[in-house]
Image (tube, grey):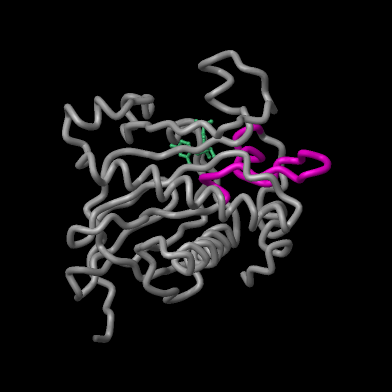
Amino acid sequence: MLIEKQTELYSGKAKTVYMTNDPTRLILYFRDDTSAFDGRKIEQFTRKGEINNKFNAFIMEKLAAIGIPTHLERLLSAQESLVKRLKMFPIECVVRNIATGSLCRRLGVQEGMDLNPPVFEFFLKNDALHDPMINEYHIRTFHWAPIDQVEQMKEYTFRINDVLKQLFLEANLLLVDYKLEFGDFQGQLVLGDEFTLDGCRLWDVETRKKLDKDRFRQGLGGLIEAYEEVAQRLGASL
Ligand code: C5P
């Protein structure tokens, strides 16, 4: 079927989602917007949408190759991808290999400490409540996701950690932490949303230079240059 873009379904902080003539498929449009602090800091960067769209496809293809079901069907254009339409669960799965960010703020643990075993956390997707941390009892009681799919989310998220930690290490990068979102597609758990440098932290192995969205959050500058450097080190074509 020839895919046609139809009306806008919703607009997030960095992506706009469109319906298509196929009710089981959506189009993601990666905008040039970058936001932080629940959308209180927003800025546009030329090429950002294209870099994120292509980087996301590069990572999603790696994950599909190791048997993780993902929503990505194919790239459609520089800033657009065709994806399966999932019923998204309102939760975020975060894995941390090195302590930083909200973990240090919440628990007072030392920044930069190796986390062994890695820490897994769930957060509720709710801007008004600032995405609070939740646990599996909340997910069960409030029916945010079926419990068997919660088990599978954890399993996929850790398998993804093993594979991506290694992939990034080969590019001399430390995968510090990252966030994933899953949904249901016809009864199957599927990885949705995106894996980009907006939703993970990557540090250079030797210098620990930050090469992710923390450059924007912390006003360090050189955001696009950092994203391009990561893609180049991985051999991902942008
Ligand atoms: O802020 P925090 O330290 O909890 O973030 C952990 C990881 O999850 C980081 O890689 C961050 O980029 C990602 N994250 C995200 N979207 C959120 C919250 C966190 O991509 N809403």
Q: Residue at x 72, y 47 (%)?
A: 222
Quadrant (top left/top right/bottom left/bottom right) for the C terminus: bottom right
Q: Position of residue 205 (x, y in %)?
A: 77, 44
Q: Nearer the viewer, residue 236 or 67?
A: 67
- Residue extending farthest to the bottom is 1
Residue at x 56% of width, y 39% of height: 177
Give the residue at x 69% y 57%: 230
Q: Residue furthest top?
A: 108
**Compared with residue 2, is residue 230 higher up or lower down, i.e. above or below?**
above
Judge whether residue 69 is colored magenta: no
Quadrant showing the N terminus: bottom left
Where does the image place residue 14, in percent across and percent down from the top left? 44, 50
Q: Is 58 placed above or below 92 here?
A: below
Q: Is residue 92 left or right of residue 22?
A: right
**Residue at the image position 69 percent from the left and 45 percent from the top:** 174
232 to the left or right of 124: right
Q: Where 229 falls versus 201 (above or below)?
A: below
Q: Position of residue 137 (x, y in %)?
A: 25, 25
Task: Please provide percent x and percent y for residue 232.
Answer: 71, 64
What residue span does the magenta drawing correspond to?
197-218
Task: Answer with left or right where residue 100 lies relative to residue 63.
Answer: right
